[in-house]
Amino acid sequence: MPVSPEQLMEELRTLCRGRGVQTPGIDLHVGPALRQVCGIVETDGAEAVRTKLRDWVLNATRGFPVEVRNAVLAPLGLHDEAQFRFLNERIEWLAKQQDRGARTVRRRMDAGLQRLVEVALQPAPSTTHVAPSELWHVKEFDALLKLDGPTPACTERRTVVADTDGVNEIAWSITIPSPTPDGAPGDLDVEVLHGVELIGHERPSPRRFLMKLRLPRPLNAGQTHQFALEVRVPRGQSMRPTYVFWPERMCESFRLRVRFDRDDLPESVWRVEEALARDTDDLTPWPQTLPLDEIGEIDVQFPHPRQGRGYGVQWTPR
């Protein structure tokens, strides 16, 4: 059922009262509009609901100006420095931070929540139609980045779907950041593991690699095919502590697993989602940090990543 912008706005205003997202028993205070836009299901308990709300708000507001973003996070109880019991206290804190009166801050809060509603209700990328000129799209992209070997290596498995008849070639590309901000772009070793034949290789720019891959047989519309590549950083070449996927065409699902060296675990790891161009350049930690499991791995998934946005992880080496 379509979400009404008025209903979503009212639910957000209601959520700001009391402790906001930090309210105990939050699962009993979230309305149907917020449940729909945040992907909250009936079986989610209070902490799962709180996590989904927090992640949705943090990701949706990432591109907002700082003052607008704070005018959303503080009232909702999501700003680390504004964890006060009542909304009035959070408004007073925000007024001091922005050197404005409480009325002005409340107007900014409403404007920020309205911007949040606009983000929530923007049309989602279609998962059922792709322009014929695109020929194919990615159904599943599964990447395993291994950092515990002699050199970083990534196994990339893709399942592609033909969107027209006669698809017999796939273009695969990767852009690598320089190992250091002022360093020269590095190089890559690419090996086909299965499912395709490498028939062309070029480097349109110092950072961008483009491969032309031939399928074993032409695909007709709706048919799928899986292939895998191994991408390695040449020995002795350092790697920037980042792996971010920037979809160039429709992708239904992206999953990334990273296996760190257990003798050289990172200081921190964070999830990157809905990043805009240049957002990941300075390696500034994002709010959502990721815990490593007991064997030094992380596993993140991104359903329906949007074209032109970045998804993945970054980390701070020790």
Image (cartoon, rainbow, N blue to C red):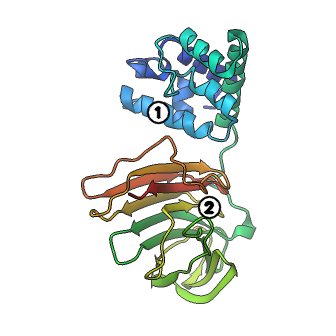
Q: Quadrant of residue 66?
A: top right
Q: Residue lying at the far left in this picture: please name it.
A: 294
Q: Are the residues at dot 2 and dot 1 in contact (C-beta closer than 8 Å)?
A: no
Q: Nearer the viewer, residue 5 or 182?
A: 182
- Residue 41 visible, this orientation: no
Distance from the alpha carbon under mark 2 to that under mark 1: 26 Å
Q: Nearer the viewer, residue 90 or 100?
A: 100
Give, as a three-letter code, the residue at label 1.
Ile
Q: Quadrant of the N terminus?
A: top right
The residue tagged with tag 1: helix, strand or loop? Answer: loop
Q: Nearer the viewer, residue 244 or 56?
A: 244
Q: Nearer the viewer, residue 99 or 191?
A: 99
* Residue 203 on image: x %, y %: 66, 82
Q: Which numbered disc flags the more N-terminal residue, 2 or 1?
A: 1
* Residue sitting at x 47%, y 71%: 156
* Residue sitting at x 35%, y 78%: 150
* Residue 195 on image: x %, y %: 47, 81
Q: Quadrant of residue 71?
A: top right
Give, as a three-letter code, the residue at label 2.
Pro
Q: Quadrant of the C terminus?
A: bottom left
Question: What's the mark number on residue 247?
Answer: 2
Question: What's the mark number on residue 40?
Answer: 1
